[in-house]
Amino acid sequence: MTKVTLRYDLARSLGEEDLENIALVHRTYGMSRVQPGPRQNQITVDYDASRLMKKDVEAVLTRHAIPIHLGA
């Protein structure tokens, strides 16, 4: 297992529904931890890079309506 940690800036503050969606993200094989970052406008994601690529992680977060800013 190759653990990777990513931080994403949020487009808005997380609400109750977002926290419920974060719980659903953990059902994805290879996603080990998703939590609000040290600053309230960030989210931290730990995942298994031997199972997922960065674009896969971003797709999972987007599919679950987590309001991340994606790099251009």
Image (tube, rainbow, N blue to C red):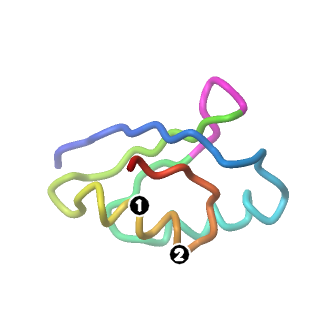
> Please, what is the dominant secondary structure of the magenta stretch?
loop
Mark 1, Cα crowd under 10 Å, few <14 / some 14-19 / many 20+, is some
Q: Given the image, on which type of amino acid does mark 2 rest?
A: Arg
Residue pictured at 67% horizontal, 48% vertical: 11
Left or right relative to 66: residue 50: left
Which mark identifies residue 69?
Answer: none
Q: Residue furthest bottom?
A: 63
Asked whether residue 70 is drawn in magenta, I would say: no
Q: Earlier in the sequence, mark 2 or mark 1?
A: 1
Q: Which residues are magenta?
A: 35-40
Q: Is residue 52 above or below residue 11?
A: below
Counting from the top left corner in percent of width and height, residue 7 is at: 46, 37
Number of marks in the image?
2
Residue pictured at 52% horizontal, 68% vertical: 62
Residue 35, picture quadrant: top right
Left or right relative to 46: residue 52: left
SS label for mark 1: helix
Q: Residue furthest front?
A: 72
Residue at the disc numbered 2: 63
SS label for mark 2: helix
Report how far apart the C-alphas of labels 2 and 1 lie in the structure: 8 Å
Counting from the top left corner in percent of width and height, residue 2 is at: 17, 44
Counting from the top left corner in percent of width and height, residue 55 is at: 30, 62
Mark 2, Cα crowd under 10 Å, few <14 / some 14-19 / many 20+, is few
Residue at the disc numbered 1: 58
Q: Are marks 2 and 1 in contact (CB under 8 Å)?
A: no
Q: Given the image, on which type of amino acid does mark 1 rest?
A: Glu
Residue pictured at 38% horizontal, 50% vertical: 72
Q: Residue furthest top?
A: 38
Left or right relative to 17: residue 43: left
Residue pictured at 63% horizontal, 69% vertical: 65
